[in-house]
Amino acid sequence: MAESYARDYSVSIGEAGRRLNQIGLLQKVMGSIRALEGPRVAGWGIDHGEDFGAWVWLTGDDQPSVEASRVAAAYDDVEIRTGAVHTYVELRAAQDRI
């Protein structure tokens, strides 16, 4: 599996293994932030490019809650982004109407 990831994302096999081992933890961290930010969540994901890491995107320009900020700050590869216009719930509802 690491060999395939290494080829797909142009990283060494060692780096691929490190990233693959991190994914489960990053998913849990994103879940914690989503639970803390609830109605503001617009999306979340993991970037697999040069800057590997997880992100949670929130609506509006207000800073994330203190609790969510603390969670993200505990991990070098987790970022909370702001500025989304629509929440995840709104986007799913719009998609369901199509």
Image (tube, rainbow, N blue to C red):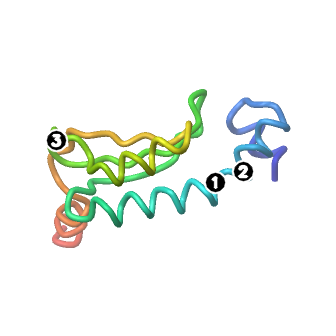
Occupied quadrant, residue 67: bottom left
Q: Mark 3 and mark 2: span between their CA atoms?
A: 32 Å
The answer to the question of whether label 1 and label 2 lie on touching residues, with beta carbons closer than 8 A, is yes
Residue 20 is tagged as 2
**Residue 30, horizontal then vertical, whole percent:** 46, 56
In the image, 27: left or right of 7?
Answer: left
In the image, 73: left or right of 5?
Answer: left
Label whose residue precedes the other's in the sequence (3 or 2):
2
Figure check: 7 above or below 55 = above
Closer to us: 71 or 9: 71
**Residue 62, horizontal then vertical, whole percent:** 16, 41
Q: Which residue is mark 3?
A: 62
Task: Judge depth for marks 1 and 3 and give the one in front.
Answer: 3
**Residue 10, horizontal then vertical, whole percent:** 72, 30
Closer to us: 27 or 74: 74
Closer to us: 58 or 86: 58
> Which amino acid, mark 1?
Ile
**Residue 93, horizontal then vertical, whole percent:** 19, 69
Instruction: Identify the residue at horizontal 63%, vertical 60% (top origin).
Output: 24
Q: Which residue is mark 1?
A: 23
Q: Mark 1 and mark 3: span between their CA atoms?
A: 28 Å
Q: Secondary structure at mark 3?
A: loop
> Which amino acid, mark 3?
Asp
Dot 1 surroundings within 10 Å: few (below 14), some, or many (20 or more)? some
Q: Secondary structure at mark 2?
A: helix
Instruction: Identify the residue at horizontal 39%, vertical 57% (top origin).
Output: 33
Residue 98 is tagged as none
Instruction: Identify the residue at horizontal 15%, vertical 44% (top origin).
Output: 60
